[in-house]
Image (cartoon, grey):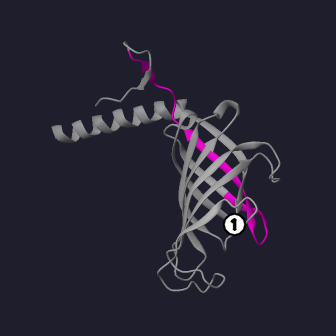
Amino acid sequence: MARHRLLLAAAVVLALAAASIADDARQILLRMYMHNVFGPPGQRVVLIVKGAGPMNPSMPPEHYFGETYAFDDSLTQNRSSSSKQAGRAQGTAMLASMRHPVYLVNMVMLLTGGEYDGSTIVVEGRHDASKKERELAVVGGTGEFRLASGYVNCTTAREEKKFTVYELNVNATIPGDDSEPEPDTGRRRRRIPRL
């Protein structure tokens, strides 16, 4: 019986701590465009691993299961590549399906300029190119996006032979600032709820 009360008390404390953090959380909505360039001029995507698996029947010839690309794409505020820069999208994409145009994407979005200058958003997920809209997970970040969670809706804004422009709509939730200054350095550290 005492054990049940202790578990109940712990659950209540955790629920209250989570509610407190949720109350202070802030939501950040961003829209930007990622310019994925496959060939010259300005190539930003390179094949780093030739897939060793079977050819994927849903893709153009010479695309094999396991092929992996590295990218360093520009992020802009509008669809045009000449519009104001918002940052860089850097990461990898691996053909993760033997039958469908599905990539596993791991990406860090480095934001430049404005209030988020130098902050990053870490994104990961399943990118199914056959879908009109794809959803990827926000799994973290740095700077203003430390401990971020949420999602990125991705749609194809423009597609040509050597490049694709993706519209990225970021919906990130940042935990509230329940930090306190360290006595020696003045840096802030997050309080950990105690049971």
Q: Magenta stretch containing residue 157, yes or no? A: yes
* Residue bounds of the magenta highlight: 154-182
The reply, left or right, for residue 48 in relation to residue 10 is: right
Tell me what residue is drawn at x 66 percent, y 54 percent: 73
Asked if 173 appears above or below 125 in the picture, the reply is above
- Amino acid under label 1? Phe
Residue shown at 50%/26% (left/top)? 177
Tell which of 92 and 4 is nearer to you. Answer: 92
Q: Is residue 3 left or right of residue 15?
A: left
Residue occupied by mark 1: 38
Q: Residue 114 at what x, y percent from top left?
A: 70, 32
Q: Main secondary structure of the magenta part?
A: strand
> Which quadrant of the structure image shows residue 167?
bottom right
> Horizontal placement of 86 versus 8: left or right?
right
Indicate the secondary structure of the residue bearing disc 1: loop
Of 98 and 53, which appears nearest the observer?
Answer: 53
Task: Give the residue at x 41% y 15%.
Answer: 185
User: Looking at the picture, does residue 111 appear above or below residue 180?
Assistant: below
Indicate the position of residue 174 as horizontal and vertical percent values.
55, 37
